[in-house]
Amino acid sequence: MGEWGVQITPVLKPGPQGGERHALGRETVVVGIDVGGPRKGFHAVALPKGAYLDTFASPEAPALAAWCIQVGARAVAIDAPCRWSRTGRARPAERALTAAGIHAF
């Protein structure tokens, strides 16, 4: 279980040479998230088949995670600050993704 009470599981299936490839089908709901910092919060959009389904905005990460589950998201794209942390350490979300085998950079 992740830091925000959400299990991060990559969606993968065997590829042609025994490796893994992403298994996103035409019916897949994809969520895009803009991370706006403490004042702006998170803004998200859900897109099934590339069409509009719903939007969501909240300053709370757990609420955003619950909404992703509610809309049936199978893939999530995160637009986060485009700079390294000021301390040089990975942010909590980056560490959670890395622990799940998902590399952000």
Image (tube, rainbow, N blue to C red):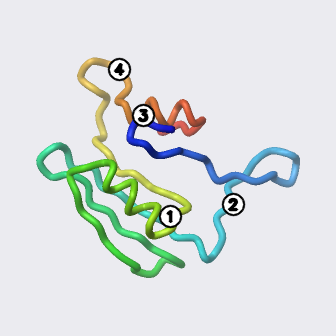
- Which amino acid lies under the numbered mark 3 shown in the image of this protein? Glu
- For image coordinates 69% across by 60% down, the residue present is 23
Give the secondary structure at mark 3. helix
Drawn side of residue 87 relative to residue 7, left or right: left
The residue to which callout 2 is attached is 23
Drawn side of residue 33 relative to residue 27, left or right: left
The residue to which callout 4 is attached is 89
Q: CA distance from mark 2 to mark 3?
A: 23 Å
- Which amino acid lies under the numbered mark 2 shown in the image of this protein? Ala
- Which amino acid lies under the numbered mark 4 shown in the image of this protein? Arg
- For image coordinates 43% across by 63% down, the residue present is 31
Please tell me which of labels 4 and 3 falls first in the chain.
Answer: 4
The residue to which callout 1 is attached is 73
Please tell me which of labels 4 and 2 falls first in the chain.
Answer: 2
Q: CA distance from mark 3 to mark 1?
A: 19 Å
* Foreground residue among 83 and 40: 40
**Category of crowding for the residue at label 4, using alpha-carbon neighbours closer than 10 angstroms: few (below 14), some (14–19), many (at least 20):** few
The residue to which callout 3 is attached is 94
